[in-house]
Image (tube, rainbow, N blue to C red):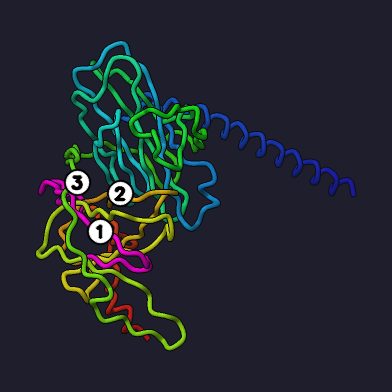
């Protein structure tokens, strides 16, 4: 009995020592991580942030994250680094700067700002979308002599509509404070690295293309029980390069599918459209070469347009799409036809 008691006390002591060591290691890690992020990483102490409740929104989430700051004078040149999971659109003082989408191992997107910043108050607004609800945003803005001007952190706020958000007529305090995950490196995002400069966005929106309405096309065959899924097909006449834009949207449904194809019957790529409340215009975050666009699950007629994109941006975005489609260990996933051939 005495030996058993001594063994029990020894095991208990070891457990307490191990628990204490784990607590000390955790505390040290929490203290060291911000120092590593601030002094050793290009993100300079910025933190991964996201909208509250993202983990509870498995059906998808679309919103704005906004950060305000003041400077004594406008820098002659500034640089903004950004990484967002899954998609982002970047605005600085109302100017649309660029957009992009995440893939495993993605580098920070880098933008050179020239003339967008001003002395006094400034605003960076990022429109964000995630098909699974959860995600993350990382932003670092530097000015002359590598001075840090803005970091993504707990001072940012979220908005779920765009009224006065991008141009800055709405106060930051009207939004909801962001959730802060922690400083990098963390989770599957790993250590952020600087990527190549992204070409700047082009404005304005071009004219809409003519729509081929579903009433002019053969309806997809139903199963005799469920009604056929409504769809709309757009034809750009020939392959064109740019960002797809859908216009004249209504509030519902707020999630539907868009497919791209070289012919009306083929599907080369499929996207999920996520709409904020009251959003009437949607644009895709990456440039593509496209001819036919098929919208499924949206019963109301709309218009489609294309924002032209330079060849270098198309090359970047197509390379990202290839990386995004690759499976485990960098191997290509089986094609749809191969999947159907499996027993």
Front-most of 92 and 232? 232
Residue at the disc numbered 1: 303
The residue positioned 20% from the left and 21% from the top of the image is 77
**Mark found first going from the N terminus, 1 or 2:** 2
Magenta span: 293-317
The residue positioned 27% from the left and 52% from the top of the image is 284
**Mark found first going from the N terminus, 2 or 3:** 2
Single out the mark in the foreground, 1 or 2. 1
Q: Is residue 150 magenta?
A: no
Residue at the disc numbered 3: 205
Query: In the picture, residue 223 is in which quadrant?
Result: bottom left
Q: Residues within 10 Å of mark 1 (few under 14, many from 20)?
A: some
**Mark 3 → mark 1, Cα distance in angstroms:** 12 Å
Image-based side of 288 in relation to 44, left or right: left
Single out the mark in the foreground, 2 or 3. 3
Residue at the disc numbered 2: 101
Identity of the residue furthest to the bottom in this view: 224
**Mark 1 → mark 2, Cα distance in angstroms:** 24 Å
The residue positioned 45% from the left and 42% from the top of the image is 160
Is the Cβ of the residue at disc 3 closer than 8 Å to that at disc 1? no
Label 3, secondary structure: give it.
loop
């Amino acid at each position: 009995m005495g030996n058993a008691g001594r063994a029990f006390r020894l095991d208990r002591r070891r457990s307490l020592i191990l628990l204490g060591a784990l607590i000390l290691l955790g505390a040290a890690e929490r203290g060291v991580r911000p120092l590593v992020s601030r002094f050793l990483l290009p993100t300079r102490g910025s933190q991964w942030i996201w909208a509250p409740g993202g983990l509870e929104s498995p059906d998808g989430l679309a919103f704005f994250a906004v950060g305000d700051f003041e400077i004594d004078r406008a820098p002659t040149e500034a640089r903004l680094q950004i990484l967002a999971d899954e998609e982002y659109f970047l605005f600085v003082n109302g100017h649309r700067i660029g957009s992009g989408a995440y893939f495993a191992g993605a580098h920070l997107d880098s933008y050179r700002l020239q003339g967008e910043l001003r002395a006094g108050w400034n605003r960076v607004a990022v429109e964000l979308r995630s098909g699974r609800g959860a995600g993350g945003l990382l932003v670092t803005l530097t000015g002359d002599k590598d001075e840090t001007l803005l970091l993504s952190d707990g001072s940012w706020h979220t908005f779920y509509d765009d009224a006065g958000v991008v141009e800055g007529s709405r106060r930051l305090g009207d939004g909801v404070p962001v959730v802060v995950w922690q400083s990098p490196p963390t989770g599957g995002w790993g250590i952020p690295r600087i990527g190549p400069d992204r070409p700047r966005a082009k404005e304005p929106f071009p004219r809409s293309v003519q729509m081929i309405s579903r009433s002019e096309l053969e309806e997809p065959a139903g199963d005799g029980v469920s009604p056929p899924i409504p769809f709309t097909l757009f034809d750009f006449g020939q392959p064109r390069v740019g960002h797809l834009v859908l216009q004249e949207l209504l509030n519902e449904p707020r999630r539907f599918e868009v497919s791209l194809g070289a012919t009306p019957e083929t599907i080369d790529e499929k996207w999920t459209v996520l709409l904020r409340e009251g959003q009437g215009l949607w644009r895709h975050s990456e440039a593509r070469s496209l001819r036919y666009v098929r919208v499924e699950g949206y019963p109301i007629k709309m218009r489609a347009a294309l924002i032209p994109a330079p060849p270098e941006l198309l090359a970047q975005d197509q390379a990202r799409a290839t990386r995004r489609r690759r499976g485990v260990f960098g191997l290509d996933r089986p094609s749809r036809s191969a999947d159907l051939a499996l027993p």
